Every structure is written in structure tokens, then in C-alpha cells.
Image: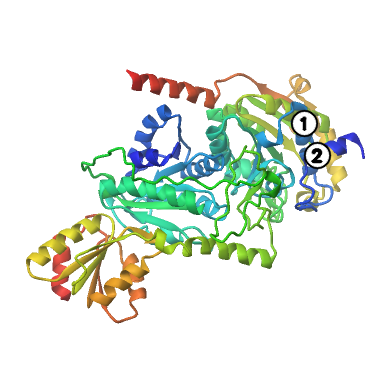
């Protein structure tokens, strides 16, 4: 067994719920591998990690790994994570969401978690579709594409998740793809180490639903598309907007410092005690 | 309620402003920080209950407070707390509905929503209060029940009781029992987080204490992992019901006032029980044998208390600020032997002692 595989197996719940629910060829396994490698490099103990998810294909991820795992309601993972983090700030809270989870049903929680700067890492698997329910269009399905609920073509504009996170105030935003696995490792590691609300958007393929309905080919072909359309953030800065129209900008989009909610709240506690003592 | 929550050990509150429950948020935002607790105002009521559940899983006693529209938004996460067996307290200060309804007027119209609002077949504990002192006591009870039975507990208060000012003495109450969730004593590798125990209540490990387990809103096996096996689902759902039903008498709270010889008994709860008590006193002065059964526990329904007065009285009167939500339960328990009359008011005003006396005069 390769070293990298051994490492992953150290964190899986072998005796529990395998085989997993995901389709062969899905990119979510690459994301899970990247997450595990990042956690291992950072050196956190299993006990201090809380992995929270919502509903959908991505929502099933926590069950397979040996952390404190919490599979919440659709779109609400960040609200549960907020409670866990504020109640016990020593815990490292990582939230896994899908595109529907994060910016459709949970869009409000997403922007407000970013605005508050809750010390939580959000990893969003963006596959442009509701996969588990059978391929309906999501807020990140591009204009003009097909899904089981846009068989005559999607007439809505799509969200850009990372740009939304930047605007909402996230202190760290990175975008990667499941093709660029090494970049993903480093983005997730940086996000986990960042204090405050950090976001990693993971562009992934759903060949089973989205790919099939739009004739985009196999999983491998869809990953090749990721390879051919990804542009590093530094290079993108030198390109014209027309050139970037069908491109995915990958890399670190934002890395800045803002006061973290739990640190600010500690000051409120001190202030309230001083007021009570007067 | 705030004092009761703090006394019970509540150290986390998440809420969203809503009339007539906002005062609870305001006061806790002042009182929690110096107690090393946390207050957070979330973006909506869905988020509020989500945060409360998260905080409880991390080991901190948690609550939220809301009113009708916010309570509607909480229903999905309420179901999560039930199936994942997460202790927490939800205060619903009832106002008139449906929809935005009557934000500043009293009502008791969420009785059935509290019972059945979240989807799926589930048990629920719902308590009420009719005095300021009772708000304090029942908040503590709500936390105790939630910790003991690993379940969300709803405190249904009407706007009149919530905004009432009464004197109460908080001596350093030695008699007050505070219950904390039972934690596992076995090593982590032996821990079965959703084990079927004789009490029906498994020990609860908090996140970060070495017992790594899975919490999900999916139907799960005894180890917390999603299951679709009928032989695991059936016993699990049955246990969720059993852990409440087999502690029925412990959860039941009701007060009997002059019911021993009552020809007519009023069954009431919340602020209406106060008017009803006054009506009993005045009726007795007129020579009428009237008594009061005050329900404090709303759900599970106080069947045994109602059966007791059904044996004594020929007539029951059930005044409520709704179209007859509890009277329906009373009639169900009655089996036709006693006459049950309702007195329903849904115009945003309280039910007065006179109105109850008039109704008694009509039916006597």
C-alpha cells in the first residue's frame, strides 16, 4: 500500500459504513483525500476536529472519517458549526457543503458566517448540480445548461461562490479543482490554519447527472475540462475579462486579517465583568 | 425565564429578534457574557436553533426564544434535535396567528404546532407557565427534562405571562434540583452513542471529550450511522417514543384547585388559568361548586389528571385563546361520560373571569 493511501486509511472509519454512497469516478473522494492530508500535515488530533455537513452527496462525507462528525439539516451546517465553535472554541470546526447547500438553501447562513468572521473552515464541493436528488439545476449551474428541471435550458445566471465569499467578508478564500489535487491540499491546509472564516471552493464534476445531461463526457473528460479551463490567479490578473469568460480562476483569492468573532466575544465578556464590578 | 435559565446552567443563547419574545434575548445578551456564557444574534430563527443544537453537542446547555413566525421556521431543526437526541430548550411566546398575525397580543394557538409542527412521528415535551414564578421554575424544569431525556423541550408562554410583572423571591434555593446529562463512563471504544438502555436514554458524550461518534438527522443505528434496515429503524423510533412515554408520570405536572367536590371543573393553562382561578373563587362565593385543573405540562397530554376530574365533575369547561386545541384532547380522554364545553377566544384579548363565569352559568 502506498504511503499516501496508508495515511488516508488512518482516518477512515473502516469497520463502519463502507462501501460509500458516491458514484465511481466522483471527485468527492479526491476532496476527502486532500482534506485528510491537510489535517495530517497540520497535526490536529482526531478528537479536536468537528466535521460538519449539510445534505446531499457532500453531506455524506463526515460519516466515513474518524472525527467528531455532525450531519445536519440541508443548508444549515454553518449554523450548527457556529454553535459548536462558540460553545467550545478549542475545537477545530470544518464544514463540508455542496453548492446547493452553501449558496441556495444555506446562502443566508453562508454570507452571515463570513460577515461575522466565525472561526470555521468551509469547504464547498461545487459540481453545478443537485446530484443526490437526480440532477436538478443549482445556483451554480451555468446559463444555458440542461438539468432535469431545466430540460429546455437554464435561464438563470449562476453564482460565483468564491467571489460571493470575498464580498461577504471571508478572510481566506481559495478556489481549486479536483483535477489540481496538490493545489487543493495546500488550499485546504491554509484554510484550516487561517483564523476566521475561510472558504475553499472545490470545482468538481458530476458526470452521472450534470455531465450526462449536457453530454460532457466521462469523469476523466470532465476533469480534463477542469485542467484546460483553470487559470492561476496570478495569470488571470494579466488577462482580459473576455478571455476569462469560460475560465476558472484557481488559487488564493483573498488572505487578509480581520478580528475573529470568538476573540472579540472574549473581550465582551471581560467588558461585561468590568461593568458588573463597578 | 432568564433567571431560571441561568440557574439551570444555560450558558448559550442564540436568537433572532421577534415580538413578544425579544426581552429574553436582550436580557441574556447582558447576563450571559459575565457568566462566561455566549449570546449570539443569528440571521434568522433557523440559524438560531441550529447554533443552539451545535452548542449543546459541544457540551453547553443552550436555549432560544421566539414567537409564532420564528417557531414555524424552527420546525425542521426541532426535528433534528429530536432524532439526534440533543438536549435544548425552546421558548415560544405565543402571539396571535396565522402568519404575522397579532405580534403584540396574546394567544394560545401554537399548542398543536408545538406537538406536531415538525414532520415525522415523534414525541415531544411541552411545558407552560401562568405566573412569573412559574416561568422561572418551568425554565429550570425544561432544562432538567431536556438533559435527562436527551430531547428538546418547548416552553409555551402566552404574551400576557411573558410581559407580566410580579414579585418573586429568589432565595438561594437549596431545594432546586439541577440535572445534567449523563455522560458515558465506559472507554471510547466501548461507547455506543444511541444504545437502547432500560430507561431508553443513552449516555451522551460531548464533542471533544474523546468519544468520536457520528450525529445525523438520518435514521441511524445504535452507533449513530445511517441505516435503512427495518430491524434497526423500528426499535430506534420505538425507543424515541418510549423514553418519553415510560417517564410519563415524572413529566406530568398539573394543579388541582378545589376540584374535590366540584360539579364543574375548568381545565385551563397559561394566563387563562389565572382568570379561571378567579372565576372559581367567585363562583364558590355564589355557592357554585366549581374547581380548576391547571395543566402545566401540555405534552405529553395530562390524561391522568383529566381522568381524575372527569370522575368527580359532571361538566368540564375548557377556556382557551384558540379555537379548541386542548379541549379536543380533553374530549378525547372523556369517552363521552361527562359534558365538555369550550370557551374559545381568538380576537387577541384575554379571557376574563367574567367570561368564564358567564360560560359556567350557561352550561350549569
Relative image position of residue B101 (x, y in whole percent):
33, 52
- Residue receiving disc 2: A10
User: Would you say residue A29 is visible in this rendering?
Assistant: yes
> What residue is rendered at 38% in x and 50% in y?
B141
**Residue farthest right in this picture:** A1
- Left or right? Give the position of A192 relative to B105: right
The answer to the question of whether label 2 and label 1 lie on touching residues, with beta carbons closer than 8 A, is yes
* Element assignment for label 2: helix
Q: Which mark is residue B351?
A: none
Chain assignment, label 2:
A
Residue pictured at 46% horizontal, 59% vertical: B124
Circle 1 is placed at which residue position? A40
Secondary element type, mark 1: helix
Please tell me how crowded label 2 is: few (under 14), some (14-19), or many (20+) other residues with Cα within 10 Å. Answer: few
Coordinates of residue B144 in the picture (x, y in percent)? 43, 49
Residue at 71% x, 49% y is: A57
Q: Are marks 2 and 1 on the same chain?
A: yes
Viewer can see residue A98: no
Q: Position of residue B136 (x, y in %)?
A: 32, 45
Q: Position of residue B255 (x, y in %)?
A: 27, 60
**Residue nearer the viewer, A187 or A214:** A187
From the viewer's perspective, is residue A194 above or below residue B321? above
**Subunit of label 1:** A
Q: Which residue is situated farthest in the bottom direction here?
A: B337
In this rendering, position of residue A244 left or right of residue B67: right
Quadrant (top left/top right/bottom left/bottom right) for the C terminus of chain B: bottom left
Estimate the spatial distance between the alpha carbons at disc 2 and disc 1, rounded to whole Å. 10 Å
Amino acid at each position: 500500500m502506498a504511503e499516501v493511501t496508508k495515511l488516508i486509511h488512518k482516518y477512515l472509519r473502516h469497520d463502519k459504513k463502507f462501501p460509500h454512497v458516491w458514484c465511481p469516478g466522483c471527485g468527492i473522494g479526491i476532496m476527502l483525500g486532500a482534506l485528510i492530508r491537510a489535517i495530517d500535515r497540520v497535526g490536529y488530533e482526531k478528537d479536536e476536529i468537528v466535521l460538519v455537513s449539510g445534505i446531499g452527496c457532500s453531506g455524506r462525507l463526515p460519516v466515513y472519517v474518524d472525527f467528531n462528525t455532525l450531519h445536519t439539516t440541508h443548508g444549515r451546517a454553518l449554523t450548527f458549526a457556529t454553535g459548536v465553535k462558540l460553545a467550545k472554541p478549542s475545537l477545530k470546526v470544518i464544514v463540508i457543503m455542496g453548492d446547493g447547500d452553501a449558496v441556495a438553501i444555506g446562502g443566508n447562513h453562508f454570507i452571515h458566517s463570513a460577515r461575522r468572521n466565525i472561526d470555521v473552515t468551509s469547504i464547498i464541493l461545487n459540481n453545478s448540480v443537485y446530484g443526490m436528488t437526480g440532477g436538478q439545476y443549482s445556483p451554480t449551474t451555468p446559463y444555458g445548461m440542461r438539468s432535469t428541471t431545466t430540460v429546455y435550458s437554464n435561464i438563470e445566471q449562476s453564482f460565483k461562490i468564491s467571489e460571493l465569499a470575498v464580498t461577504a467578508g471571508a478572510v481566506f478564500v481559495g478556489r481549486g479543482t479536483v483535477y489540481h489535487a496538490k493545489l487543493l491540499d495546500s488550499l485546504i491546509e491554509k484554510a484550516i490554519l487561517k483564523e476566521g472564516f475561510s472558504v475553499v471552493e472545490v470545482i468538481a464534476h458530476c458526470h452521472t447527472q450534470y455531465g450526462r445531461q449536457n453530454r460532457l463526457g466521462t469523469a476523466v473528460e470532465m476533469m480534463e475540462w477542469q485542467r484546460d479551463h483553470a487559470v492561476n490567479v496570478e495569470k488571470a490578473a494579466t488577462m482580459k475579462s473576455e478571455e476569462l469568460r469560460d475560465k476558472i480562476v484557481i488559487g488564493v483569492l483573498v488572505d487578509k486579517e480581520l478580528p475573529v468573532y470568538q476573540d472579540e466575544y472574549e473581550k465582551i465578556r471581560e467588558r461585561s465583568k468590568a461593568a458588573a464590578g463597578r | 425565564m432568564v433567571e431560571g435559565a441561568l440557574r439551570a446552567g444555560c450558558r448559550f443563547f442564540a436568537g433572532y429578534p421577534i415580538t413578544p419574545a425579544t426581552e429574553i434575548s436582550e436580557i441574556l445578551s447582558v447576563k450571559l457574557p459575565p457568566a462566561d456564557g455566549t449570546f449570539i444574534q443569528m440571521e434568522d430563527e433557523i440559524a438560531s436553533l441550529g447554533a443552539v443544537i451545535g452548542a449543546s453537542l459541544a457540551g453547553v446547555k443552550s436555549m432560544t426564544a421566539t414567537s409564532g413566525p420564528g417557531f414555524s421556521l424552527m420546525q425542521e431543526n426541532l426535528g433534528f434535535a429530536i432524532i439526534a437526541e440533543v438536549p435544548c430548550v425552546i421558548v415560544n411566546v405565543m402571539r396571535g396567528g396565522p402568519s404575522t398575525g397579532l405580534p403584540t397580543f396574546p394567544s394560545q394557538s401554537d399548542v398543536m404546532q408545538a406537538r406536531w409542527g415538525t414532520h415525522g412521528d415523534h414525541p415531544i415535551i411541552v411545558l407552560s407557565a401562568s405566573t412569573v414564578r412559574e416561568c422561572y421554575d418551568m425554565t429550570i424544569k425544561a432544562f432538567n427534562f431536556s438533559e435527562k431525556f436527551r430531547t428538546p423541550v418547548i416552553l409555551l408562554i402566552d404574551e400576557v405571562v411573558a410581559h407580566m410583572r410580579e414579585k418573586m423571591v429568589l432565595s438561594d434555593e437549596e431545594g432546586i434540583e439541577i440535572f445534567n446529562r449523563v455522560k458515558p463512563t465506559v472507554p471510547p471504544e466501548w461507547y455506543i452513542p444511541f444504545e437502547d438502555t432500560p430507561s431508553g436514554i443513552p449516555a451522551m458524550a460531548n464533542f471533544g471529550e474523546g468519544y468520536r461518534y457520528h450525529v445525523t438527522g438520518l435514521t441511524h443505528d445504535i452507533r449513530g450511522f445511517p441505516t435503512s434496515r427495518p430491524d434497526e429503524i423500528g426499535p430506534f423510533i420505538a425507543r424515541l417514543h418510549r423514553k418519553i412515554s415510560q417517564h410519563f408520570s415524572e413529566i406530568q405536572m398539573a394543579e388541582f384547585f378545589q376540584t374535590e367536590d366540584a360539579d364543574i371543573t375548568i381545565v385551563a393553562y397559561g394566563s387563562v388559568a389565572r382568570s379561571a382561578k378567579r372565576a372559581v373563587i367567585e363562583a364558590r362565593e355564589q355557592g357554585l361548586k366549581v374547581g380548576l385543573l391547571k395543566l402545566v405540562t401540555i405534552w405529553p397530554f395530562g390524561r391522568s389528571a383529566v381522568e381524575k376530574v372527569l370522575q368527580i365533575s359532571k361538566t368540564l369547561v375548557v377556556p382557551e385563546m384558540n379555537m379548541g386545541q386542548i379541549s379536543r384532547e380533553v374530549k378525547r380522554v372523556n369517552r363521552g361520560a361527562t359534558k365538555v364545553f369550550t370557551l374559545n377566544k381568538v380576537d387577541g384579548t384575554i379571557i376574563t373571569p367574567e367570561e368564564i363565569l358567564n360560560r359556567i352559568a350557561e352550561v350549569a
